[in-house]
Image: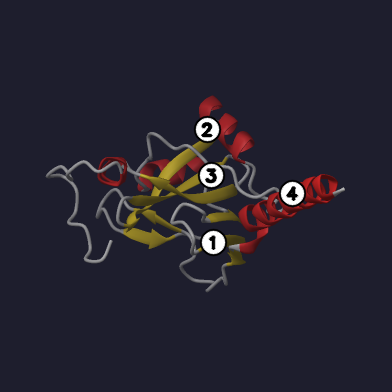
Amino acid sequence: MTGKLLAGFIVLSAIAAGLALYYFQIYAFYEPVSATGDDDVQMTLMASGQPEAILYEDFEAIDASSSPIRYRACFTTEMSQPLLTETYEAYEKAEPRNGPEWFDCFNAQEIGAALESGAALAFMGTENIQFGIDRVIAVLADGRGFAWHQINTCGELVFDGEPAPDFCPPRPEGQ
């Protein structure tokens, strides 16, 4: 009898732990990002190398303080892909990361497939928005846009314990 109770307790504890882990990964840490209406979507100009706000509507975003790469955003823009290509820096190795399923405007598989086929174009949003992390913007021909954070070359090296190459910006104190 004691063995059955102990086994039942272990099974119930494992189920509770699994449900808690699921909840924390999918729901607990994400919070909606409040739109400012002015500079929520920025892209880096080719001419100056500085980010500037673009024209956008229908901005919706989430973020989590538990990781710098949990940021996801969706928006629409009236700006055409040719105009964007002539004005803003392209981002060569854009790889959208999966977001939580409940944030249904952002589908990393669809965005990735659109980037591979050329239906979407990727641009540098803000380089080193946090040390080693870039904000990437992708825009489809129909004006739907997406933003996410992606680890850049400096981040990959430093986060793996390697020294930062000379081309990397200095790492801020405390990071």
For the residue carrying disc 2, how many other residues have a C-alpha within 10 Å: few (<14), some (14-19), or many (20+)?
many
From the viewer's perspective, is the residue at label 2 or at label 1 nearer? 1
Label whose residue precedes the other's in the sequence (1 or 4): 4
- Mark sitting earlier along the chain (3/2): 2
What residue occupies the far top of the structure in this picture? 117
Of 65 and 22, the residue lying toward us: 22
Q: In the rendered image, which residue does mark 4 sit on?
A: 10
Measured in 3D between alpha carbons, the distance from the residue under mark 3 to the one under mark 1, in whole angstroms, is: 20 Å
Direction from residue 149 to residue 28 in the image, left or right: right
Q: State the CA–CA distance, disc 1 to disc 4.
A: 35 Å
Q: Residue furthest left?
A: 166
The amino acid on which the numbered mark 3 sits, given as a three-letter code, is: Val
Secondary structure at badge 4 equals helix
Looking at the image, can residue 57 be seen? no
Q: Could you tell me which residue is drawn at 62 percent across and 61 percent down?
A: 60
Direction front: furthest residue: 1
Horizontal and vertical percent position of residue 116? 52, 27
Callout in the foreground (1, 4): 4
